[in-house]
Structures are given as C-alpha cells and as structure tokens.
Image: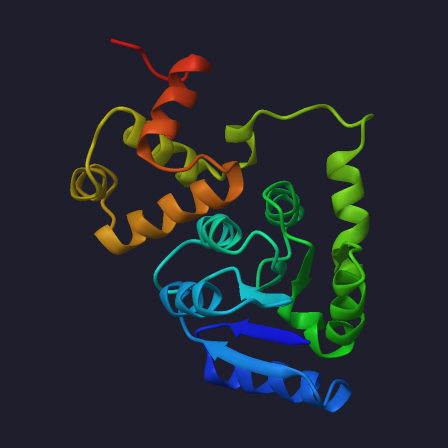
Amino acid sequence: MRILIVDDHPVMRFGVRQLIERHWPQATIAEAASLAEALEQVRASPWDLAVLDLSLPDTSGVEGLVQLRRAAPTTRVLMLSMHDEAAYAARALQLGAAGYLTKEHAIKELVVAIERVLNDQRYISADLAVRLADLLSAEAPARRLHETLSAQEYRVMLLIAAGLSASEIAKTMHLSVKTVGTYRSRIIDKTGLAGTAEIARYCVANDLVDSD
C-alpha cells in the first residue's frame, strides 16, 4: 500500500504518518508540503491514496484536487480539511474526492476513513454527514452557486466578473490584496468555478452583472 500525505503543516503530516504507520506498518508513505511537490510524486510513481489538505499554499483546495486527479486518475483522494461546511465536502465529492475528513476528527476517524476509501467506498466525517445529507436532499430547495457565498465573497465575485484586478478590488473594498485573494479562493472552493473566465460567464448567465 502506497500513501502520499499532502499538507503544508509538518506537525499535521507527522501525526497522520504516525497513525498510518501504527495500523499499516508495511505501507510505503511519502510526504509533500505543497501541490507542486505532490504532483511531482504522483507523476514519478503510482500511489493508492493521497491524503490531501484542502488549504495548500500554492493552490486553493478544489483546484488542487482537480489537478491531482488529472495527473493521477487512479489515485484515490481523501480530503483533510479545517473547513466543516457541508458545501466544501459536497464540492470535493463532486470533483472526484473519495472522502472528506475534518482535521478536528482526524485522529479518531482517519483509520476508518482510509480503510473505506481503499475499499472503493466514500467516507464523510461523522460531524458532516447529517449536514451534507440536508444539503443534498431532494426535498431541500436548490440553491444557485452564488447563494452559498458570504456577503463579502459575493461582492468580490461581482467585481471579478466586472473585470477588476485584485488590486482594484482591494482599493474598491478597502481590503488588502491578500484578503481579496483569500476571498477569491473561497469563491472557487464553494462554487467550483475554475477561475476568472468561468466566474464572469456564470455571473452573466445568472444576470448578476451586465453582459456589456
């Protein structure tokens, strides 16, 4: 069994590695601190499982998942995240993740999650299961993508669609460029819209901005 741990926090990587080694002492384990390092690993050799942090320094979570799945389509991906919002889990599963585990519950659930995923089953953190079921319930009213955003995220989305640069948005909203980048990453994570062009097309299609 070959498992790749992708997380920018050394302490988290160490903890995950210890749990895996305790239960699967014969497993081959490697670590990556960024998406770039992870892509190098999966292109160099095959892996049964990647435990992937949603928030990496060189990408937003779902973008990282998409790139990893594209580079290694046979590698199962178990997302490990600080975010306990059902929308994040739902989007990750839609994009091909085999499981979604919150870091808060990683210690007590990681082994079970890995076993399930390696047996080609999906796994969701217990604390997220009910909320995810509610979100995906056929009886629940369908929400358009932008309705999952906070007020600030929604405003940034509209300004991106209007063609403003990060610095222009920062000036307009009296924010730092870094904060604008954080909002942009959250928008992509929550909606799955892959970049400025898709955000603009979505906003025009849903009459959120003028098409002119």
Residue 42 position, x and y percent, is 48, 65
**Residue 12 shows in the view:** no
* 33 relative to 27 in the view: left or right: left
Residue 71 position, x and y percent, is 47, 54
- Say which residue appears at 58% left-offset and 82% top-offset: 29
Pick whichever, 151 or 105, lies toward us: 105
| As drawn, 25 above or below 83 | below
* 107 relative to 44 in the view: left or right: right
Quadrant in the picture for residue 43? bottom left
How many labels, in total?
Answer: 0
* 101 relative to 138 in the view: left or right: left
- Say which residue appears at 64% left-offset and 57% top-offset: 84
Quadrant in the picture for residue 81? bottom right
Pick whichever, 59 or 84, lies toward us: 59
**Residue 195 shows in the view:** yes
- Quadrant into which the N terminus falls: bottom right
- Say which residue appears at 63% left-offset and 26% top-offset: 143
| As drawn, 106 above or below 102 | below
Residue 115 position, x and y percent, is 79, 69
| As drawn, 210 above or below 30 | above
Pick whichever, 139 or 202, lies toward us: 202
Residue 193 position, x and y percent, is 45, 34
Q: How is the image coloured?
A: rainbow
- Quadrant into which the C terminus falls: top left
- Say which residue appears at 50% left-offset and 49% top-offset: 62
